[in-house]
Image: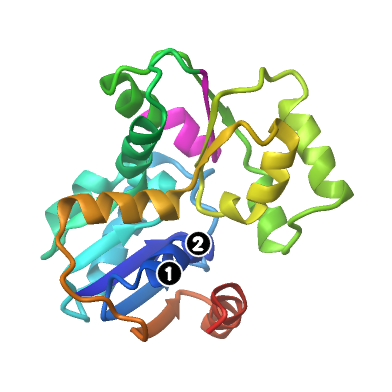
Amino acid sequence: MKVGVFDSGIGGLTVVKSLLQHQLFEELIYFGDTARVPYGIKDKNTIIRYAIEAVEFFKNFELDLIIVACNTVSAYALAEMRESATCPVIGVVESGALATSNTLHDKTSDILIIGTKATVNSKAYERELNALGFKNLQAKATGLFVPLVEEEIYNGAILEATLNHYFHDTKTPHALILGCTHFPLISDALQNYFGKDVLLIHSGDAIVEYLEKIFTFHTRYPEPILQFFASENPEALRAIAKKWLHI
């Protein structure tokens, strides 16, 4: 299969990393809309328009599947992307909720969702989790984590101060949903802050679990064909991909 992965910037590379680790696809095309990142502060109509433009970009590649690695786009524009696409389109919100349900069997568990302002305001995770029987949900917009990750600040005093800023009055949850694909890169810091017993739900791992549930993969591809595109400064994206993905 040939898959396209779309993100507003570089965060979706964490999803690509999970896809590569599980060797699911023969060819992978990544597109990051780096010229217009971040999406998390934009209005719904703008997010939808950008998402449809990404679908048009992917039509150049005759894809078998599009994975929307951006939580904000998954929350607001999945239906419109499916209408425009010529192949199936799946997002990280539904897969993240299902991964939570598959791992966390006590429906009374306290779940904290973190993401961009737009993702949190959409209440998309709450709708999916409510439908699966979870009720004790809290969502918090933690947009400052995005530029920290973009600056490759994965630990240290600045990140610790930001963690305290967001969570100093937050009850320790049973599970923490990383509702932005940037956030797995600070998962160690988040785990240390909340404690080793808190379950972290990672979009990349969740999407792999979801894919393996709905598709049958007869072949594994240890050396897939990779292409990386960006709407601005593609060479910077490719350099980050090489660093993060060790390719």
- Residue 95 higher or lower than 152, as above or below: above
User: Quadrant location of residue 66?
Assistant: bottom left
Q: Which residues are magenta?
A: 110-124
Residue under the image location 52 percent in, 68 percent down? 35
Amino acid bearing label 1: Gln
**Residue 30, image x and y in percent?**
39, 73
- Residue 229 higher or lower than 22, as above or below: below
Q: Residue furthest right?
A: 157
Of label 2 and label 1, which has the lower sequence position? 2
User: Quadrant location of residue 174?
Assistant: top right
In this view, the residue in front, 195 or 247, is 195
Amino acid bearing label 2: Thr
**Residue 185, image x and y in percent?**
62, 56
Instruction: Classify 10 Å Cα crowding around label 1: few (below 14), some (14-19), many (20 and above).
Output: some
Residue under the image location 34 percent in, 77 percent down? 29
Using the image, tell me which numbered label, if any, was put on residue 75.
none
Residue under the image location 31 percent in, 65 percent down? 54
Q: How is the image coloured?
A: rainbow
User: Quadrant location of residue 95?
Assistant: top left
Residue under the image location 80 percent in, 32 percent down? 164
Using the image, tell me which numbered label, if any, was put on residue 21.
1
The residue under label 2 is: 14
